[in-house]
Image (spheres, grey):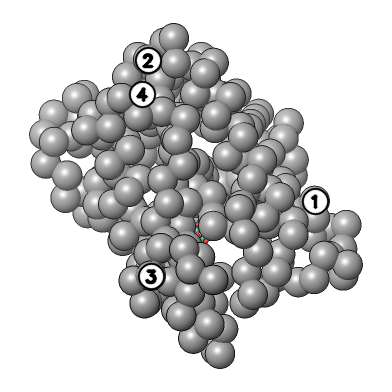
Amino acid sequence: MDCRRRKIMLATGLSSAIGQALIDALGSDTGSAWSIISTTRGSMRKACQGVPVEWVSIDFRQGFAAVLGGVERALEERAVNHLDAVVHVAGVVFSDQFQSTTAGEWRDTMAVNLDAAAALMQAAGPRLAPGASVVLVSSVDAKVTSLAGPAAAYGASKAALEGLARHLAVDWGAKAVRVNVVSPGALDHGAGPHGRAVETVVQRTALGRLGRADEVAEAISFLLSDRASYITGTVLSVDGGLGLSY
Ligand SMILES: NC(=O)c1ccc[n+]([C@@H]2O[C@H](COP(=O)([O-])OP(=O)(O)OC[C@H]3O[C@@H](n4cnc5c(N)ncnc54)[C@H](OP(=O)(O)O)[C@@H]3O)[C@@H](O)[C@H]2O)c1
C-alpha cells in the first residue's frame, strides 16, 4: 500500500505485550494501513508485521513538561502535522498496601499512567485530524480493588485516566475526534495475577479464565476503526465478566 496513505498513530508503551499484540492486529487489518510513532525507554527496533514503528526514547518519570517537550520535538522532527490516532498503553503498577506505598512509587505511578497521557494529549491535540480516534488503556482496578494485590496508586491513576478521557471526548467531539478507554481485567502476562491469586481471580471471572493481550488489542483496534464511528467517552471492559458475581 502507498506509504502516503498510511494513517499516523502516536502511541506509548507499544513494547508491552498489549502493544505488540496491537501492532499485530493493525498489521492484519486489511481496511487501513498504519504508521506508528511510539515512545519507549529503550530503543526497540523490531520489525512489526508490515507496520512501520518509529521508537522515540522518553522516560515518563521525568514528568509532564519533559514528556510534552519530548513528544512535541519528536513530532516536529518528523514533520507530523496531523494524527489519525493516539493510544496510551504504557502503565506501571507497584502492588502493595496503601500504607507502605512510598512517595516515589506514588509519583512514578501517576507520572506514567496519568501525567504522560495528559502530556501526550496536549502534544497531539492541535494535530488531531477530523475522524481521529484516541484510546487510553485503563484497568479494572479503576473501579474495584484486586484481592490478588491491592494497589491504591494504580487504581487512583487509572480512575483519573478514565475521567480525562470523558473530558477530552467532550472537548474534542466538535472536531469529530473520539476518545475512549479500554479497561482490561486480569491478564495472563505481566502484572496479571500470579500463583494462588490466579485461582481466586478465575473464580470471580464469568468466563472462567484470564484474558490475553491479543483480546485487549482487538478491542483497541475496534475503537480505532470507523466501525466505532459513533462511540466516544466510553469505557470498554475486556475482563471476561470479572467481578459480576460476589
Ligand atoms: N497485564 C495485565 O494484567 C493488565 C491488566 C489490566 C490493565 N493493564 C494495563 O495494560 C497496559 C499494558 O500492560 P502490559 O502488562 O501489557 O504492560 P507491560 O508489558 O508491563 O509493559 C509496560 C509498558 O509501559 C511502558 N513504561 C513503563 N514504565 C515507563 C516509563 N517510566 N516511561 C515510559 N514508558 C514506560 C513500557 O515501555 P518501555 O519498556 O518500552 O519503556 C511498556 O511498554 C498498562 O497500562 C497496564 O496498566 C494490564
Q: Which amino acid does label 1 sit on?
A: Arg
**Quadrant of ligand 1 in image:** bottom right
Judging by the rendered image, the residue that carries numbered circle 4 is 132
Q: Closer to the N terminus: mark 2 or mark 1?
A: 1
Q: Closer to the N terminus: mark 3 or mark 4?
A: 4
Q: Closer to the N terminus: mark 3 or mark 2?
A: 2
Taking the spot 55% from the left edge, 89% from the top edge, the residue there is 195
Q: Which residue lies furthest to the front in this view?
A: 246
Judging by the rendered image, the residue that carries numbered circle 2 is 176
Q: Closer to the N terminus: mark 2 or mark 4?
A: 4
Taking the spot 34% from the left edge, 71% from the top edge, the residue there is 207
How far apart are the alpha carbons under marks 2 and 4? 7 Å
Q: Quadrant of residue 246?
A: bottom right
SS for tag 4? strand
The answer to which of 158 and 49 lies nearer the viewer is: 158
Judging by the rendered image, the residue that carries numbered circle 3 is 206
| Badge 2 residue CB within 8 Å of ligand 1 | no
Q: Which of marks 3 and 2 is in front?
A: 3
Graded by Cα atoms within 10 Å as few (under 14), some (14 to 19) or many (20 or more), the crowding at tag 1 reads: some
Label 2 close to label 4 by CB (< 8 Å)? yes
How far apart are the alpha carbons under marks 3 and 4? 34 Å
Q: Is residue 105 visible?
A: yes
The picture places residue 3, in percent across and down from the top left corner, at 20, 30
Q: Which amino acid does label 3 sit on?
A: Ala
